[in-house]
Amino acid sequence: MLKTYTGSCHCGAVRIEADIDISAGTGKCNCTLCTKMRLWSVEVRPEAFRLVAGEEALTDYRGRNPVAHHFFCHHCGVRPFERIEMPNMTGHIYYNINVACLDGVDIDELVAAPVTYFDGLNDDWGSTPSEVRHL
């Protein structure tokens, strides 16, 4: 069910709002950055995402994937979302919202939702990595 969630970085300088259907599924990637950050995300289209506050507190880290903007708060270091501009398989721009940064997520709904695993490590986004237990 579609619900409007609020969320933030740890210190609260960066605040977001997004219309999300958690039950539709979440994602985890095995690329070096997502693995180190243990990113668990949910994808939303640009029209479903709003940066409420903290644009000036964001730093845009561009890793090995040139299409991904990994935004983090330069005060506390937490990464509440990222923007993917040249889509990886989707045909559209999207945002990955860090589910750990969302307020009021129903844990039962979160763990019941399907998880899609992406092989970003090998730039093979359509394949599931052979090992996902650490993600």
Image (cartoon, rainbow, N blue to C red):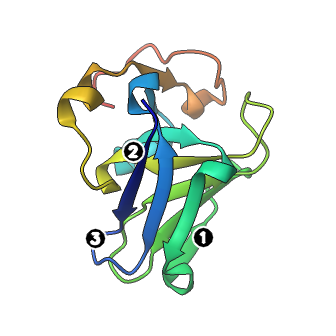
What amino acid type should be assigned to the residue bearing mark 3? His
Instruction: Judge from the rendering whether residue 101 lies leftward or rightward of residue 127; answer left or right.
Output: left
Whole-angstrom CA distance, mark 3 to mark 2, is 15 Å
What amino acid type should be assigned to the residue bearing mark 2? Leu
Whole-angstrom CA distance, mark 2 to mark 1, is 16 Å
Residue 64 visible in the current orientation: no
Query: Mark 3 Cα within 10 Å, few/some/many (few <14, many 20+)?
Result: some
Location of the C terminus by quadrant is top left
What amino acid type should be assigned to the residue bearing mark 1? Asp
Label 1 near label 3: C-beta < 8 Å? no
SS class, disc 3: loop
In the image shown, does 87 or 45 lie closer to the viewer?
45
In the picture of the structure, the residue carrying the numbered disc 3 is 10
In the picture of the structure, the residue carrying the numbered disc 2 is 39
Instruction: Of the two numbered discs 2 and 1 on the same chain, state the one appearing first in sequence.
Output: 2
Q: Nearer the viewer, mark 3 or mark 1?
A: 3
Instruction: Judge from the rendering whether residue 14 lies leftward or rightward of residue 58; answer left or right.
Output: left
Residue shown at the point (46%, 33%) measured from the top left:
30
Q: Residue furthest left?
A: 108
Q: Nearer the viewer, mark 3 or mark 2?
A: 3
Residue shown at the point (28%, 70%) measured from the top left:
10
In the image shown, does 23 or 97 lie closer to the viewer?
23
Instruction: Of the two numbered discs 3 and 1 on the same chain, state the one appearing first in sequence.
Output: 3
Residue 3 higher or lower than 121, as above or below:
below
SS class, disc 1: strand
SS class, disc 2: loop
Residue shown at the point (35%, 68%) measured from the top left:
9
- Residue 99 position within the rendered picture, expressed as x and y whole percent measured from the top left: 36, 46
- Residue 32 position within the rendered picture, expressed as x and y whole percent measured from the top left: 48, 44
In the picture of the structure, the residue carrying the numbered disc 1 is 60
Residue 18 visible in the current orientation: yes
